[in-house]
Image (cartoon, rainbow, N blue to C red):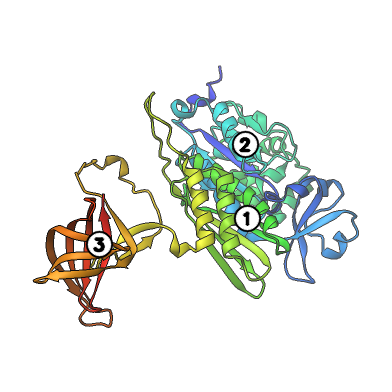
Amino acid sequence: MDRPLNQDKALYVCMYAREFPAQSLLRFRGELRDKACVVMDGEPPKRYVCSLNSRARKLGIIPGMTQIEIDTFPSVTALPRVKAQEATAKAALLQCAGTFSPRVEDQSNDTYFLCVMDIAGTEKLFGVARTLAENLLERVRALAIVVRITVSRNFHAAVCLARRTSAGNPVALIPAGKEAAVLAMLPLSVLDLSTELAETFSTWGIRTLGMLAALPERSLIARIGQDGKRLSQMARGNWPHLFLPIEPAFKLEEHVALDSPVELLSSLLFILSTMLEQLALRVSARAQALASVTITLFLEGNSQHLRTVRPALPSNDRQLWIKLIHLDFEAHPPQSAILALTVSAEAGIVRKTQLGLFTPPLPEPDRFDITRARIQAIVGKNNAGSATLNDSHHPDTFHLDSFSVPSDVANRAIVSLSRVPMRVLRPPEPVIITLSGNRPLKFSFLGVTYTVVRAYGPWLANSDWWSSTLWGYEQWDLIARTHNGSLIYCCLVHDLIKKCWQMTGLYD
């Protein structure tokens, strides 16, 4: 009786994406996915096909063809290879694999992506092996990449089955003890043989792993050396492997090289929308949200244009990000055509608030972010924000900081203090005053004469004697009455430098 697959001590999931240079380029080019496309590598005139999609393969195109040969095929789109875009796509796949297992080994090469995950002991988290593989496939499809996923108790058996040339089911499992039978019909190309060994086996008439496994192991070693033992056991699915896990850094970044220079903002936002969707999918898998987005535009003339957008609260709403970026680029447009762009992001914690049944709903933070961005686009970024008092005794001095919600806002204690509200007059209104022994007796404010009933003060304040901004004030808080008995509670200031009196505020 065969043992169930998920009861083995060793259990591996292999994820394989063929023609990776082509897939990484077509991720953000939905209009080209149904067309024949090839990826050209090298410098002219020695450019050659390094990767292609299935439609190009059906036309008879093979890797290694030159640009002249490609031009003989009708309706074929040739794209230049962009290794930076391949690197970001590879990082996205490794991060996706890391959400299912902390032990991931990368075995990719120049033309395909291949990683293996050790999923032993993950049944209680993700279910049986097939359930995990199907969930992984769904997550990878959201990244717009086509992969094959195989599960086996043997590392190399999972890799060989994932490299099979036939289309078949994208998810395949090898039952425990059935490795040799499942691998028997696979071609020798899944072993990634050297050219010399491939020619040798072709001369012997060995075409499949089953035929290789049927050869006497000792005779095979005698003819091709120690590689014979390794290949023979790999064909049977029992060659051991020393797992070498990597630790991929969590980095939210996408890169796109454009086919032609882009000048219209609408075209740029269309590309950004797809890139932001991918970043949101990746960060939401970690139960987080996008806290800030930095866009680097590579322009004609070897220049760059960098902008950072940061809302008040982290969010994965793509429409919100597009609107904020749109407003930012309208206020700070690039100065020349765009050749490529990189979008990087920082992750943040999603804040959730549970309101009571009878508590009125709070305004949506997304609407506040858009309103703030529109105000900044009109008055300027430095003229809109959160007012912060300066560390000075100079009255009415403050500066504007970028608005942000403090992380400890929910833990702050609310202290209720009884204070008298005052309406500050900006700018202060001049007054005509009558003194009695250096104390205010009467004053005229906005054409009305007031008689002082009570006077509190003076309070002296002065500073900046070392600079040209020297100032000095004498402040009085007054209660005054008009001839008809109306009272006014006010604050008068005597400017000791300009030798004048001013009304600076009215108490309610």
How many callouts does the rendering have? 3
Q: What residue type is labelled 2?
A: Ile
Residue denoted by label 1: 86
Marks 2 and 1 sit apart, C-alpha to C-alpha, by 20 Å
Of the residues under marks 2 and 1, which one precedes in the sequence? Answer: 1
| Residue located 75% across and 37% down the image | 166
Secondary element type, mark 3: strand
For disc 1, the neighbor class at 10 Å (few under 14, some 14 to 19, many from 20) is many
Residue carrying label 2: 149
Type of the residue with mark 1: Glu
Residue placed under numbered mark 3 in the picture: 449
Q: Which residue is drawn at 44% across and 59% down?
A: 384
Q: Position of residue 199 (x, y in %)?
A: 75, 52
| CA gap, disc 3 and disc 1 | 79 Å
The quadrant in which residue 299 appears is bottom right
Q: Which of marks 3 and 1 is nearer the N terminus?
A: 1
Q: Nearer the viewer, residue 131 or 460?
A: 460
Mark 2–mark 1 contact, CB under 8 Å? no
Q: Look at the numbered disc 1 and give the secondary structure of its residue.
A: helix
Does 298 appear above or below 412?
Answer: below
223 relative to 506 in the view: left or right? right
Q: Tell me which residue sits at (61%, 35%) in the image.
A: 137
Tell me which label, 2 or 3, sits earlier in the chain: 2
Q: Do the residues labelled 3 and 1 touch (CB within 8 Å)?
A: no
* Circle 2 SS class: strand
Of residue 449 and residue 330, the one placed in the foreground of this image is 449
Rendered view: 109 above or below 379: above
Neighbour class for label 2 at 10 Å: few (<14), some, many (≥20)?
many
For label 3, count other residues whose C-alpha is less than 10 Å away and answer few (under 14), some (14-19) or many (20+).
Answer: some
Locate the N terminus by quadrant: top right
Residues at circles 2 and 3 in contact by the CB criterion of under 8 Å = no
In front: label 3 or label 1: 3
